[in-house]
């Protein structure tokens, strides 16, 4: 039982390392998947100063992605499903662990050229919760310009394949 507990803790730490920590989570996404996934996002991305941690992005459909997180901290990869939401020209990614009961983690994502993406975590200190995407999207649009809306540490990924 103790071994299983430690494996869960190590797995959670690996997820926090690659996807930055504990961003704002929601039971509903910011939107349904309608934004097309650009081929420029597809590939293997290595986290800057991430000890070789990688994030493989592949298309699951025209508007959804499969993310495979690999870390030296865990032997097993972790799988996610994701899609983009465009709010007033700002691109957000809705990330959900590939399991039935998981919630959406929300990040702002900026593509800087062909080989770099910068991921900003939506702060977990937002107290509002939403039961529909439209209300949450309106809240994001009204508040995303505020300094408190994102955590202070962005994470950069560089395309390696």
Image (spheres, grey):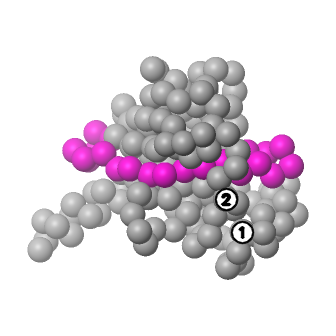
Closest to the observer: 23 or 100? 100
Q: Quadrant of residue 148?
A: bottom right
Task: Please tell me how crowded label 2 is: few (under 14), some (14-19), or many (20+) other residues with Cα within 10 Å.
Answer: some
Closest to the observer: 37 or 69? 37
Task: Please tell me how crowded label 1 is: few (under 14), some (14-19), or many (20+) other residues with Cα within 10 Å.
Answer: some
Point out residue 61 in the picture as x, y percentages from the top left corner: 54, 42
Tell me which residue sits at (49%, 42%) in the image.
60
Point out residue 8 in the picture as x, y percentages from the top left corner: 26, 64
Are the two marked residues, 2 and 1, in contact with CB atoms closer than 8 angstroms? yes
CA–CA distance in space, label 2 to label 1: 8 Å
Residue identifier under label 2: 32
Q: Quadrant of residue 39?
A: top right
Q: Would residue 121 be visible to someone looking at this image?
A: no
Relative to 24, residue 37 above or below:
above
Determine the main secondary structure of the stretch shown in magenta: strand
- The numbered mark at residue 133 is 1
Image quarter of the N terminus: bottom left
Tell me which residue sits at (67%, 79%) in the image.
131
Image quarter of the C terminus: top left
Between disc 2 and disc 1, whose residue precedes? 2
Secondary-structure class at tag 1: helix
Secondary-structure class at tag 2: loop
- The numbered mark at residue 36 is none
Between label 2 and label 1, give the one nearer the viewer: 2
Q: Is residue 108 left or right of residue 8?
A: right
Q: Quadrant of residue 154?
A: top right
Tell me which residue sits at (70%, 60%) in the image.
31
Point out residue 143 in the picture as x, y percentages from the top left corner: 84, 63
Q: Is residue 33 left or right of residue 66?
A: right
Q: Which residues are magenta?
A: 71-91
């Amino acid at each position: 039982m103790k071994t299983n507990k430690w494996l869960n803790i190590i797995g959670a730490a690996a997820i926090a390392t690659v996807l930055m920590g504990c961003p704002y989570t929601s039971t509903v996404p910011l939107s349904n998947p309608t934004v097309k996934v650009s081929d420029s996002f597809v590939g293997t991305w290595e986290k800057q100063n991430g000890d070789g941690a990688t994030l493989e992005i592949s298309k699951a459909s025209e508007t959804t992605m499969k993310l495979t997180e690999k870390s030296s901290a865990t032997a097993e990869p972790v799988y996610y499903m994701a899609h983009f939401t465009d709010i007033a020209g700002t691109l957000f990614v809705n990330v959900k662990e590939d399991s039935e009961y998981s919630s959406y983690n929300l990040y702002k994502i900026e593509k800087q050229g062909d080989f770099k993406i910068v991921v900003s975590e939506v702060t977990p200190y937002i107290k509002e919760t939403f039961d529909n995407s439209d209300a949450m999207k309106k809240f994001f649009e009204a508040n995303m310009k505020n300094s408190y809306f994102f955590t202070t540490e962005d994470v950069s990924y560089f395309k390696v394949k």
